Image (tube, rainbow, N blue to C red):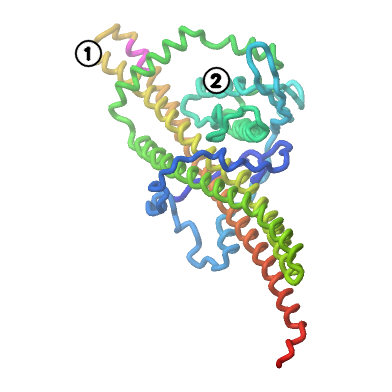
Amino acid sequence: MEGELPAAPRGSSGPPAGDAGGDSPCALLPAEALALDGDEDDLEVFSKDASLMDMNSLSPTMPTSPLSMINQVKFEDEPDLKDLFITVDDPESHVTTIETFITYRVATQTSRGEFDSSEFEVRRRYQDFLWLKGKLEEAHPTLIIPPLPEKFVVKGMVERFNDDFIETRRRALNKFLNRIADHPTLTFSEDFKVFLTAQAGELSSHKKQGPGLLSKVGQTVRAVALSMRGVRSRPEEFTEMNDFIETFSQKINLIDKISQRIYKEEREYFDEMKEYGPIHALWSESEEDLADMLGGVASCLDRCCQATERRLCGLSEALLPVVHEYVLYSEMLMGVMRRRDHIQAELESKAEALTYKKADTDLLTEEIGKLEDKVECANTALRADWERWKQNMRNDIKSAFADTAERNIHYYEQCLATWESFLTAQSDLYAKEPPEDKP
């Protein structure tokens, strides 16, 4: 993977831990919501392939302290030059005779001159976000469009409208829009501006202005035909890019699976620990001689339980969403490569037709000229966006794992201090007790 495991865009959207936009307090996902298959074989040490890890990026004189090691991979914040701020919040449920759906408030603040006002507030449903993503892909086929959350974000979660699902989706939609806002090209898309500013009726009218159904079907059929034909001479740099994407997809999917399994097991541990403290408290009521000690154990368990809950919040807010977003990015990148290849395949098809004079030569020559320009534009766009995305990805993933490591260290330090304090108190109490009289 050309260097190291991935990281995040300049101006990566929102705060690192919980995402932007007035987040509600951390709600722990139920362990059963993370339905993972039972295949353990793929959870072996995946880091044996060092192609995704560049240890040379860390200083050879790195301090041995864990916290010092974590600080080695942190990045200094760049100056905030943003002029477009977007927040997705306030989900509302709508029930009609046909369907039930959720809308979200999209609030925008901007100092850009092309906007008619400095503040906008609209309501959007998931289908509107899908429309925006489709328009951006249509206008910029080889730019890396940020991914949207799936229809069902969490595996195994049946109830689409429970609070955890809605909050998870809200965070992802918030990140989606802020990723676009931070993109050097997509942020100036007219469709993006319409999405942020148009009221419901105006947006519906704008949607109808796109290509008709028959046109879309024709484009799809042609794309499928070209994809089956394939490209004959893909440039080496894009072949390497494709190989990178395939490797990255395998690795990030495995990391996503392991991360979810860790969360599931930690959640089960937390659920059991919650019962442990009260049991010791009840036990202390029936054991007069051990009451103080059992009460102390119950108190320690309670404090460790609270620390575990905070740790789970950190995983569900800071690590799992980042890893899963890049799972979706890997799928998006494969689509980008297919679209790039379709453009090149169309050029090759026209060039072949010209060689064998299968159509009007002058017309083909003109079309080939246009397609050559289109291929060059597509390649240039992808080349530039690729480097930007890789740097963003590396920053994001390093930040997520460094934050998780710090949280883990803090968690274990808290638990250790809790039990050490208890043991010290017990030792002092034992030392003060008078020795038993010998016979």
In the rendered image, is residue 228 in sight? yes
Query: Whole-percent x and y of residue 192?
Result: 62, 23
**In this rendering, position of residue 135 left or right of residue 434:** left
**Quadrant housing residue 364:** top left
Quick one: label 1, few (<14), some, or many (20+) residues within 10 Å?
few
For the C terminus, the image quarter is: bottom right
Q: Residue at x 76, y 82 (%)?
A: 433
Label 1 vs 2, first from the N-terminus: 2
**In this rendering, position of residue 305 left or right of residue 133:** right
Kind of element beneath mark 2: helix
- Above or below, 114 against 246 in this view is above
Q: Is residue 368 magenta?
A: yes
Residue type marked 1: Tyr
The residue that label 1 is drawn on is 356
Q: Residue at x 52, y 65 (%)?
A: 62
In the rendered image, is residue 1 in sight? no
Query: Whole-percent x and y of residue 84?
Result: 69, 32
**21 or 188: nearer the viewer:** 21
Kind of element beneath mark 1: loop
**219 or 163: nearer the viewer:** 163
Quick one: label 2, few (<14), some, or many (20+) residues within 10 Å?
some
The residue that label 2 is drawn on is 135
From the image, give the main secondary structure of the stretch colored magenta: helix
Q: Residue at x 40, y 27 (%)?
A: 338
**245 or 159: nearer the viewer:** 159
What segment is highlighted magenta in the picture? 364-369
Looking at the image, the residue that sits furthest to the front is: 439
Labels in figure, total: 2
Q: Residue at x 28, y 27 (%)?
A: 232
Q: Which mark is residue 398?
A: none
**Quadrant housing residue 239:** top left
